Image: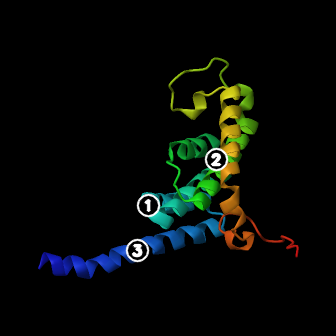
Amino acid sequence: MKLLLSILLFPCLASAAPAGLASADQLFAKNLYQEALTAYGKSAGLPGEEGLRAQYRSAECEALLFRFGEAAQRLADLKLPADPLWRGRLLLLRAETGRSYLTQYGYSLPADEQQGTADVTKLTRAQWQRRIEADYDSLWPLRGELLKQRLENEGYFVELKGAEWGV
């Protein structure tokens, strides 16, 4: 009986995740970043593509809400996937979020390095710059795989409106 019930309920549970992501994407498209962040948070723990999309957009929402520290911490805590495309997307977002953090808070960063801290707000300017450079350097070995991807297919991650497409 329990097996039959779980088989009947499983498709409902499996289809609920993409619906949550779709509603979060709609909120994001309407520039309702706080509401979208809450909605993405429900899908962020999912495995696979949906979970990665939710993690990516959660960090993006935090950055668009000028919460660069929270976005940087989220991305620093995230285990990078083995898939080169997703790894490249997340490395680029992490590097750009780090640059935004430095722009916003670089004047008030601590001067002394604290060893062993996982809190990105405790990093010095030099530590931030090393992390950002390391993220950009990590993109280089991925270039072969990343070049195979069409930018037109990356509209979820890159603003393509008004882009000029060369031949």
How was this image coloured? rainbow
Looking at the rendered structure, the kind of residue marked 3 is Ala
Classify mark 1: helix, strand or loop. helix
Mark in the foreground, 2 or 1: 2
Q: Please, is residue 15 above or below residue 124 in the view? A: below
Quadrant where the C terminus sits is bottom right
Classify mark 3: helix, strand or loop. helix
Looking at the rendered structure, the kind of residue marked 2 is Arg
Judging depth in this view, the residue of 69 and 156 nearest the camera is: 156
The reply to whether callout 3 and callout 2 are in contact (CB within 8 Å) is: no
The reply to whether callout 2 and callout 1 are in contact (CB within 8 Å) is: no
Quadrant where the N terminus sits is bottom left
Q: Please, is residue 133 above or below residue 45 in the view? A: above
| Quadrant of the rendered image containing residue 46 | bottom left
Q: Position of residue 54 (x, y in %)?
A: 52, 61
Looking at the rendered structure, the kind of residue marked 1 is Lys
Judging depth in this view, the residue of 96 and 139 nearest the camera is: 139
Neighbor class of circle 1 (other Cα within 10 Å; few <14, some 14-19, many 20+) is: some
Q: Residue at x 56, y 46 (%)?
A: 75
Q: Which mark is residue 94?
A: 2
| Quadrant of the rendered image containing residue 131 | top right
Q: Which mark is residue 16?
A: 3
Question: Which residue position holds label 1?
Answer: 42
Q: Residue at x 44, y 61 (%)?
A: 42
- Would you say 96 lies left or right of 50 here? right
Q: Position of residue 68 (x, y in %)?
A: 64, 43
Q: CA distance from mark 3 to mark 2?
A: 29 Å
Residue at far left of view: 1
Upstream in sequence: badge 2 or badge 1: 1
